[in-house]
Amino acid sequence: MSHGAPLFVGNWKMNKNASQTRSFIEAFVPLADAIPPHIRIAIAPPFTALGSAAAALSPSRRVALAAQNVSEFPEGAYTGEIAVSMLAEFDVAYVILGHSERRLYQRESDAEIGAKVRATLAAGMTPILAVGESLAVREEGHAVAHVLAQIDGAVGALDDESAAQLVIAYEPVWAIGTGKNCDCERAQEMALAIRQRRSAFAEIPILYGGSMKPENAAAYVRMPDIDGGLVGGASLDPRSFADLIAGAVAA
């Protein structure tokens, strides 16, 4: 991996309340301290647990805080939404945007995701842009074109300086939470296509997500254009998440 320090982000989705989050952090931080310090680690708890997570993490800067979404609007009459300024209060470093579950259930468009990316960048946080194809698109042979169209639709208008601040996570929809894995070679093919889409992506972290586990993480990060993982279920247990990161790094 030659694109900066590896990054592993635990996306907890709609799991763990505030007290469970504190318990996780108490168990996880000592394990994370044993991982080489150049490896970047972040967790993305639900919004209701961000405050307790920030408080529990405050003595240690080893683990960064991420959010699972954000509004494109700075404030106002947007019931149920969360503004970037609200995340900043908790020292959120990363924001996951464009996850396939939000594209599916909340009908988020590339244009809306792009607006959220710009709001996140303007607030000094790092967007993690999630992209990926369905099984039908993959089987039709259009996976690469589909993913690149998602990227172009969301961040194609960004200038190079802004585009170089992104993290992009490739998550094939058919492999998320299904136990099915996109094999390493196909994941690398996609990561390379993303990196080559524009010169500004030459050095950004590209993550793989989709049923990444302790037993398969190393195989992905051995690929030359995959720089870490956006981890779902395996990040919910502190030992599992630590083992995944440590094993991937050691390999």
Image (cartoon, rainbow, N blue to C red):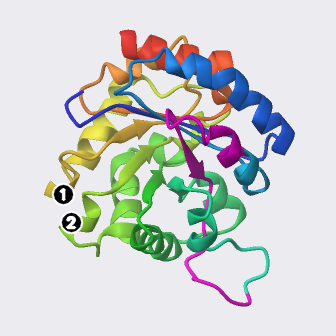
Badge 1 crowding class, 10 Å Cα cut-off, few under 14, some 14 to 19, many 20 or more, is some
Residue 142 in view:
no
User: Residue 164 at what x, y percent from top left?
Assistant: 24, 57
Residue 106 shown in magenta = no
Badge 2 crowding class, 10 Å Cα cut-off, few under 14, some 14 to 19, many 20 or more, is few
Q: Amino acid at mark 1?
A: Ala
Magenta segment: 53-77
User: Residue 237 at what x, y percent from top left?
Assistant: 71, 23
Residue 55 shown in magenta = yes
Residue, disc 2: 161
Q: Residue at x 19, y 66 (%)?
A: 160
Q: Is residue 57 left or right of residue 36?
A: right
Return the residue nearer the eye: 76 or 155. Answer: 76
Q: Residue at x 70, y 52 (%)?
A: 50
Image position of 227 with respect to 95: above or below = above
User: Residue 149 at what x, y percent from top left?
Assistant: 36, 62
Q: Residue at x 48, y 28 (%)?
A: 182
Residue, disc 1: 200
Image position of 126 with respect to 172: above or below = below
